[in-house]
Structure formats: C-alpha cells, structure tokens
Image: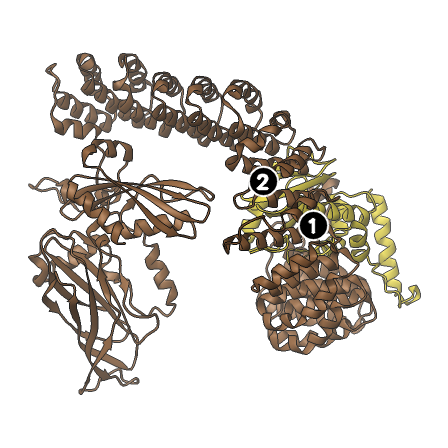
Chain colours: A yellow, B brown
Amino acid sequence: MELPPKVKNILLLDSEGKRIAAKYYSGDWPTNTAKEAFEKAVFSKTQKTNAHTEVEVTALENNIIVYKFVQDLHFFVSGGEEENELVLASVLQGLFDAVNLLLRGNADKREALDNLDLIFLCFDEIIDGGIVLETDANVIAEKAGINSIDPNAPLSEQTISQALATAREHLTRSLMK
Amino acid sequence: MAQPYVKKDDDHDDELEYSPFMGIEKGAVLQEARVFNDAQVDPRRCSQVITKLLYLLNQGESFTKVEATEVFFSVTKLFQSKDTGLRRMVYLIIKELSPSSDEVIIVTSSLMKDMNSKIDMYRANAIRVLCRIIDGTLLTQIERYLKQAIVDKNPVVSSAALVSGLHLLKTNPEIVKRWSNEVQEGIQSRSALVQFHALALLHQIRQNDRLAVSKLVGSLTRGSVRSPLAQCLLIRYTSQVIRDMSNHGQSGERPFYEFLESCLRHKAEMVILEAARAITELDGVTSRELTPAITVLQLFLSSPRPVLRFAAVRTLNKVAMTHPMAVTNCNIDMESLISDQNRSIATLAITTLLKTGNESSVERLMKQITNFMSDIADEFKIVVVEAIRSLCVKFPLKYRSLMTFLSNILREEGGFEYKRAIVDSIVTIIRDIPDAKESGLLHLCEFIEDCEFTYLSTQILHFLGIEGPNTSDPSKYIRYIYNRVHLENATVRAAAVSTLAKFGFMVESLKPRITILLKRCIYDSDDEVRDRATLFLSVLGGDGTVDTDKDSTEFLFGSLEVPLVNMETSLKNYDPSEEAFDINSVPREVKSQPLAEKKAQGKKPTGLGAPPAAPASGFDGYERLLSSIPEFASFGKLFKSSSPVELTEAETEYAVNVVKHIFDNHVVFQYNCTNTIPEQLLERVNVIVDASEAEEFSELTSKALNSLPYDSPGQAFVAFEKPAGVPAVGKFSNTLTFVVKEVDASTGEAEDDGVEDEYQLEDLEVVAADYMVKVSVSNFRNAWESMNEEDEHVDEYGLGQRESLGEAIKAVIDLLGMQPCEGTETVPSNARSHTCLLSGVYIGNVKVLVRAQFGMDSSKEIAMKLAVRAEDASVAEAIHEIVANG
C-alpha cells in the first residue's frame, strides 16, 4: 500500500512527561493506558537529550519520533518506521513555530495551559486524521489564532459583569507574574 | 483530578504548579456546560467550557453515552452565535464527541449552511466536520457541494474537501470515485498543499487500475509538480510502478530511474531523501544505480541537522545489509558519527560500520566503540553486541579482539538483557570458532565468579559441563565451578553439582577428585543439591573405574525428550504406588497452542457450530476418551491425534469437524457434530464413509451417536484397519445420516415420528503428516550429530514461485507436520535464504530430524535443499517421498 505520509501522533508534554495535549491518529495505542505508557517511554528516552536548538530524532518501538523542546514544553511528532523523517520534521517545525507565534514568543507550560484552546486548534489545523494538512507556521497560527471577540458584536454589548470579569482576570494575571 | 484538595494546597505553596485546570472535575464541567442552553449565548464563557471539556477528553477521561449526547445537543445550540472563535471550538468538540448517526441529523443543516458561507474558515471547517460524522445517504445529498469545494478558489477549502475525500474513500468509495475530474483539476492548483492532497486522492481513486496509475505517474514525472510533499508522493508512486513493471516481466532499461535520479537534485531535502531511499530499495538495484543515491546520503551525514544525519545513516544501514561494498565510501564520515550527540545516530553508525568494515579495520573500530559504550543506554548496547556477534562470524580470524571486547564489556555494569546478549554472543562464538573455545570458556568462568543473575549462571554452568570436558586442560575449570557450590544460591549450587558430575564422568583423571568434591556436597542445606550429589555419586560409581554405561551418558548428556509441560501433568497425575513412574508413558506430543481453537470459537459468537470438543480435546483427553470406548480399547497406544478439521462450512445447519486418531494398526475418525437448529432433534446420527479412494484402509466398526439435541455437541466414530506401521494415505468421502424429529419450540418436546435424512460432508484426507508427531529437541545440533551421518538423505527441490520465504517454509512445515526447532520457522524480513530445523517422531517411534535450507532468487523462485536424518534409513526416504509428492 502506497499511502501519503502519515503522522501517528502529536504530543505536547511538560518537563515531567505529563500530557498537556496529545492527539493520536493511529490505532496502535487503543487505550489511554497504552497512550500514557508510550508517552512515558518517549519522554524518558528523550529527556536527557538537548533538543532546544535543532529538531532531534529517535526510534522507538518501530516508530520514528522527531522532537523539539522549548522551556518546559516538549513537542513530539511520531510516524511509522518507513516514514520520511524530514516530512515528520517539517510537521513538527510547523507546529512548534505556530505555537510560539500564538503564545507571542513566551512559550512555556503556563502560557500553553492558559491558551489550551489555541493549542487544540493548532493540532487541528496541522493534521487531519493523520494526513498533513498544513506545515507553514504562519498559516497555521493565523487559522488557529482567530480573535475570540465577535467582530459583529461591539464592545458596548458586553455586559457589565463580563467586562468586570475580564478586568479582574487581567489584574490577577499581572499580579501573579 | 482524584485529589483536588491536595493539589490545591500544592498550588498555594508553589506558584509554578499553577494551572487553569487544577482540580477540574468531570461532573462539575458537565454542570457548567448547561450554559450552552442559555437564551443569550456568552461566547467567551462557552469557549472556556468547551476548552475544559476538550481538556478532560484529552487527558483520557471518557464520557458516558448519555453525557456525550447531552453535551452534543447543547453544543448544537451554539450555532446561533456568530462568534467565529466559538464556532471553531464548536467544530472541534463535535469531532471529538463523534455523535452517532441519528444524532448527526441535528447539526447537518447548520453545517451545510456553514459549508456555503461566505467566510472561508467556516466553509473549510464545516466540510471537515461534516465528512467526519456523516454516513453514505447524507453524503449523496452534499456531494455537489463537496465537488464545488474541491475547485474552490480558496486553497484551504479545497484542501479540506480533498483530505475529507481521502477519509471518505475508505467508507464510500463509489461516491468519491465520481469526483475524479475535480480532483484532476486540483493537481494543477498553484497551492502546494492542494496539489499534494489532490495527488494523494487521485492515486487512491485509481490505485487498482495499474494502467491509469502508470499513466498518471508518466505524465507528472515530466514535471508539473511543485510542492515537495507532492513530489515525495510522486516518488513513492513511481517506485510502485517500477515494482509492478518488473513483476510483469518487462525487462531492459529500468523505466523512470532517470526521474528518481533527477529528484536527487531537487532543492527540498525531503524530496532528495525520498528519492535516495526509493533508489536504494529498488528490486535488484545495481551498484551503478546506487552510486548517486549514496553520494547524496553521504553529504547528509555531515549535515548540522540531526534529522538529516539520522535519515541518512538509517538508510545506509539498510543498504549495508545487502550491498556492504556500496557503503564503504561513507565509512570515514560514519566514523565521525560514533561520537554524535544523538545516541540513536551513533548506534546506527556503529552497526553500519560493523557491517561494512573489512577485516583490517576491525581493531580500530573496536577501540572507538570501547570509548562509546560507557555512555549509551543498555538497549543501544544490545544492538552493538549483536552486530559484533555477526561480525565475528564473518571474520573468524578476528575473534581475539572481538572476544576481548566482549569480555571487557561483560565485566562492566549492565542489566540482565544486556548481559544475556553478551553471554549469548560469546557462546555463539565458542560454538562457531573452535579456536575461540578455551579463552571464551575462561571469560565465562570469570563472569560467573561475580554474576548477579541466577539464570545466566545456570546457563553458563550447563554450557561448561558440555564443552569444558573436551578442552585440553579441563581441570582448570573445576575451581570456578566448585566455588559456586560455596558461594551461590541453591539453584546455582545444584547446577554446579551437575556440571561437576559431567566433568567427572568424561575425564577419567579427574574422577577421583570430583568424587571427593561431590561427597562434600551431600551435606548441603538444600534438598535438590543433596539429591543431585547423591545421585551423581552413585552414577560415577565411586570405585575409580570409568563407567562407560550408555545409560549414564544418556542420563547426563541426553536431553529430556518429552515436553516439560506433559512431564509435569503426568507427574501430577501419578499416584505413589508399587508401580514406578514410567517416563515412556508421558505423551510426547507438543501441545499445540489452544490459539487455533480460540480463533475458531471467535468466529461463532453465538457459541454454535462444531465446538472444539470441550470434554475431549488435547492428547490426554483423546486418549482417555478412546480407551473408554470398548470397541477401540484393543487398538493399543494412541500415536497421534490431529487437530480438528472442519467438514462443513461455517454457519450451516449441522456443524461437523473431524479428528483423526492414528494407532499402529488402526485409524479412528472422531466426528464432532453440532446441531444448530433449535426446532430439530437428531437421532441415530451416523457417518457413512466411502473409502474407495483409500485402498489400504478397510472399515472395521463404527459407533453412532444416539441423540443430538440442539446446541449440545456429540461424537460419532468410525474405525479403520490399516497395515501395521505403514503410513498409508487416502481420501475418504463422508455422509452424515440421521433421523430428524421436529421439536415444539414452546414445550421443548420432540415429536414421536422422525424422517430419515442425510447431509453431505466434505471429503477428508489422511496424509503423511498425520503419521508424524511434533517433538521438539532442546539442542538440535547435538541431536543432529548424534544421529548416524551415513543415514542422511539429501536432495534438492524447486518449490516454484512463492510470495515469500516464510510462506514456503510454512508450507513445508505443514506438509511434514514436524516441530520447528530453535525458532527457525521465523524468517528475518528481507532474508534471501534461510535454514529451518525440524524434528519429529514418525510412526513406529522413529526419531526424525530435518535440516531444510531455502533460497530465493530475484524472481521469487524458491529452491530447497532438504537433509533428513532418521533412526531408520527407510523413514528418511519416506520423508523425501512426502516432499517429492507434496
């Protein structure tokens, strides 16, 4: 069977190997336990490597895994043994740069969790059912980063309590930093 | 999520642990989701709740059917909001919830509206969502919109439709195939990704039409594809076309090779790699074709990007298996990769070097690896050790430096799997290279002086017992072995005692001293150690003369001929009584894994159909069953029972399978019948067997089944007489005869009057393999050598074209009905030749060993060289006859 390049999963783990977001496109890991076991194996295998500058690569259980880290965020993209590493790497790079753009350059676990909706949208824009949908970071970020304020609803229509809630949230955030 | 309180405390202590999802809980979020139903939708709040739901799903939480349905219905209400951000989240959650087909109706109209929206983002996403949840009938309704979308001027919309087409092709191929024209247009698109998706879909649509694929590739290779991803695809399709063409006997200049080669000069590295890999994987690639590909891969080896280095070295590693010479040019670049930061790359580089290295470079290489070994993980080390083992077999003269290397790493820290790989390698080298024996054994002796793994210690002691006595100075091993008796746990002590005894038995000069050592062991604290010491002392006789008794040799060096499982069962069943336990009473049949039976059951979920004879399956069960039937009691000992052979199709009215029981003078067919019709009761069930095509058999007796109610299996038997000890073969046709009685469904009572009827069953054959019992031997080589070499029969056979070596080997194993030994029935994936070792016992209790060598040429023609050794020369001939006729 000659199929187009397939991505088996995309993982975003934190510096302890805990899942921040993950999307599986292959039936190789049917249960959540299997998925967690895979994530643990991937994490412990790559933990000690330095993937902060270049995309790194390794093989695990007949899968090729490319990965890149920034701060306490660990990005992984896996594909089958026969897959073209450079295709996987371009997917990873697209994801990595898009997330960086969306988090305005300060990508770390906290920002990622605060903007988890954007991360999910990013995943959705990169791969559709295992097939590469887009690899250009700018395009992905643009598509995922749609401003959540409705263009048709002017600011005045926000209720007072809404406005207050927004203000309070901004204040707490700036205090916690 | 389980302990929100504890986590919250941490939260306050440690600001870093802050998370917006701290202490989040499914029940609470589902409550929150009610906000979707509010008359005035609050987009911001709703988006947050959807994110929370997605977070829960993403963390592995699952929603019950009811919960999912409820969320789904309330989410659909959010379509009334015009907030684009919220709409995106709604799309996402619908895909995650994967609603059932009756629920889908609710959203289709909303999604179809979005599909025709002016906003590109809505169109693209609505298509993706709709295609993910839709079924065939709905698909026909939206088909024209999808066709339109494929040629949409916005590439995002177009890609969404094409990718959805790729997914839909699996479920609704006939519909998607109608989109060819639009897809074709997509290939000409200026957008790189649209081109890629269109090419993928067009190929999928045409994949079964070889000519069309060939045409497609032919037209595109002339260069209109711009996207690197599409170009990679095109390369994959091209190699497929090349493969198909060579399969169909078109010879001459390889078509499309030029295209592949031109791709090596593409500006995208992705394409270069794909092309280089495609070239190296061509069937029967010549070194002239390989060279340009190897050259670009060599350039990649020194790239600053790890992914490129990895890809290159991985490809070269594969090439080195088949064309080691082609890769030698890269050796210098490869050597510098041994110190690569990325250990995966370093390991691949080393194993490649070990494959391509020539005899003169071995020493230098070993030195480099020594520095490298200390800082890689065990799993990498095992790969290296295995590569060294094969290198040693390739260059026997270099065993000294390789053995030194292995013994050095054996002394270092390491886990069990790693140590075992090293020990296995040393053992292989000792076996294959006689010169390496003495030094190898000493290395192993030193290792067990300080070995924390009981399993390895006992294995090595056993091996020492076999190899040690034949060395020039056996006495030097005694110290190491006897030390174990003092220093180790009971298992190792017992193994050491056995090994000592072997030395005492084989080496006359050592016997008195060994006897003294063994005498000390009879005061050991462990029963097993004492028992063994006492036993061996009596075998050794203690009188100073060498006992050449054959029984003792057999006892000490022979392997247990019965499978351990069977031995265990027999011993458990044995009542301590006057009669001594007879090892010959232990069945020798290797229990076939009950896997096949399980599969058979799996096919019939209702539990109907011929069952695998629950009360009497397995050799023991059959033996008990048959001896309990007076008619068959006089037939003697059961030699073999076949696995059940189905005589009916699955899901017919009556399910019948047959088990063939082979005795010395007789054959008994056991028909397991099941009645699958609740409204019927069968009586006087008998099988009429026509043996006109089985001349050597004559029917002796048959035993009918009196009554066969619905779904409760029963057995009928037919016995045949055949010439004693002869592997007679033949074909039998079977007809089931019975009396049918109607059963009243309400009362379950049968009517009094029945109708006679018959039912044609499939034919049954007794074949040569039925006379062969699968018996494994623990050490094939020893067993092989202990058989008379002069009785060996060798012949060669052509097996014709086969899919793969593995298939040919399986066919031969099935034909002979023998037990594959030492895992030789599995073939490495791209091997061109393989040796398979088989053992079995032929009727008349004749031990047979077979060594079958297989080879495959480029046209998949398979040749086999079959060497047979048997205790009886005529049996060896018979085996060849089976193969010749099979």
Q: Amino acid at mark 2?
A: Ala
The chain ID associated with circle 2 is: A
How many angstroms separate mark 2 from mark 1 (CA)? 34 Å
Estimate the x, y position of residue A111 in percent, counting from the top left.
77, 46
Q: Can you say whether B465 is above or below B283 in the image?
A: above
Between tags 2 and 1, which lies in front?
2
* Label disc, if present, on residue A59 of the rendered structure: 2
User: Do badges 2 and 1 share one subunit?
Assistant: no
Residue A64 left/right relative to B478: right
Q: Amino acid at mark 1?
A: Met
Q: Residue at x 70, y 46 (%)?
A: A92
Estimate the x, y position of residue B53 in percent, counting from the top left.
68, 60
Estimate the x, y position of residue B425 in percent, counting from the top left.
41, 27
Q: Residues within 10 Å of mark 1 (few under 14, many from 20)?
A: some
Q: Residues within 10 Å of mark 2 (few under 14, many from 20)?
A: some
Outermost residue toward the front? Answer: B252
The answer to whether residue A13 is seen in the rendering is no
The chain ID associated with circle 1 is: B
Taking depth in this image into account, of A171 and B879 the one nearest to the observer is B879
Q: Residue at x 73, y 55 (%)?
A: B225
Residue under label 1, please give it.
B22
